[in-house]
Image (cartoon, helix red, strand yellow):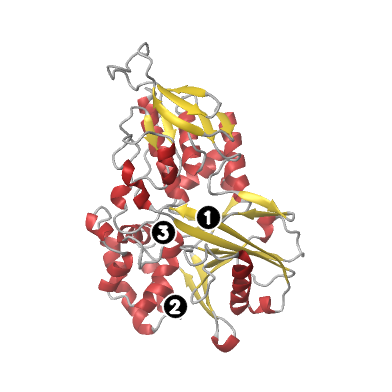
Amino acid sequence: MVGAGLAGLAAALACADGGAAVTVVERRRRLGGLTWSFEHDGRWIDNGQHVFLRCCTAYRDFLARIGSAGDVEMQDRLDVTVLRPGRAGGPPDVARLRRNDLPAPLHMGAALLRYRHLGLADRLRLGLAALPLRRVDLDDPALDAQTFGAWLSRHGQGPRAIGAMWDLICVPTVNLPAAEASAAMGAKVFQTGLLTETSAADIGWSRIPLGRLHGERAAVALAHAGADVALGERVVSIAERKDPASPGVSEGKGPAAPLEVRTEGRTLDADAVVLAVPHHAVNDVVARGTFAGQDELDGLGASPIVDVHVVYDRRVTDLTMAAGIDTPVGWLFDRTVSSGLADGHGQYLAVSMSAADAQVGRRPEDLGPEVVAALADLLPAARDARVLDTLVTKEHKATFRAVPGTAALRPGPLTRTPGVVLAGAWTDTGWPATMEGAVRSGLAAARSALVAAGSTRRLPEEVA
């Protein structure tokens, strides 16, 4: 297993559960990939805010597998407060999107009709897009030939509706606004999350630091499964063994050609290898031509996420999470408890800005105060509170850039080299680059790797 993000961890555990002897090699000195935590001034900070939905079944099963299912919170029903700055420094304009128990898509009807951030005409026109989106064929190549914004415009959605409603979901899930995102990804998010199952979009989040939820718990699960884990070790190449004495190499016989995995300090033998690294790192490990489309991987690009972490000397909101429109605050999360901040010693809010092309290059000393001022516009109690600390974290390559045309660039798990399989949220999962997509890719890779290694008695089940 090369790489120990969520895709690599899911693949490693599935292979171990399938009876394989597993070695995980990770260049970082931690597990968990882009979901990690660090200590800062006695508080635990997550590099970014990651939530999941009830429809993220593979990810939720992964949490159960590593013993973390009890450390997440799940809404009993989708309920999101949406904040907009008030006029002339007045109180914020507050709306609430809360589903009921009617069958989808009727479960959101009442909330959308009351959604005060849109005029009545825009609210009534939401159905002009929602109903066709529910029926659209997600496998239709025409979807990936256009932006989600263009698709929405053709279905009666104006700029205000797109910005105040559709982008509220599209930006944090696809990590692009509808104006740039592929319609295939936008359609996937809304059809799967909001338009087919009543409870699918109920939101879940971690009650503990992500580094503990994923990395530390996965390390224990891997140890119990008998897997070896090598941290701080970089793989430099994966190739078929050229030793003519190895059976099946020259003639291509047998379930898989024996493989050599070279790190900077040693060589490992493998019957199969899961390469679970970011798409921009693949060509550093395997030779060109290993799989179709490898030379076009740069076309997947990258989309950044920036988080601003603010600690106040007192509580400024009772909201666990909220979304913002017409403000730099994309989503805000109360991370006071998970950070370890002692009760009564203030409040820690994390502000997540997805699709952060405009913010990622800015200096923290400029961006931090801007977000603090934006929070004061949304949270009246923050105006009188003292800011104890502000920290900015950036993931320049948080996800691939899911613009039109990228569906054809996302490879499946199989490569031209027998036994070498691919995993990662950037591969062809049908999902955006989310935690769910990463875990699904790991399970698909594990199935292929186990078959290649000739171990097919306990293959992981395919996720619907």
User: Quick check: can you spot residue 265?
Assistant: yes
Q: Residues within 10 Å of mark 3 (few under 14, many from 20)?
A: many
Quarter occupied by residue 146: bottom left
Mark 2 vs mark 3, foreground winner is 3
Three-letter residue code for mark 3: Val
User: Which SS class for mark 3?
Assistant: helix
- Please state the horizontal and vertical placement of residue 371, each as a whole percent of the image: 59, 71
Q: Quadrant of the C terminus?
A: top left
What residue do we see at 59% from left, 84% from top?
A: 91
Tell me the distance, in whole angstroms, between the alpha carbons under discs 3 and 1. Answer: 15 Å
Q: Dot 1 corresponds to which residue? A: 395
Three-letter residue code for mark 1: Glu
| Numbered mark located on residue 115 in the image | 2
Q: Residues within 10 Å of mark 1 (few under 14, many from 20)?
A: some
Tell me the distance, in whole angstroms, between the alpha carbons under discs 2 and 3. Answer: 23 Å
Q: Is residue 173 left or right of residue 41?
A: left
- Please state the horizontal and vertical placement of residue 119, each as a whole percent of the image: 39, 83
- Please state the horizontal and vertical placement of residue 193, each as a whole percent of the image: 40, 59
Where is 295 relative to 117, above or below?
Answer: above
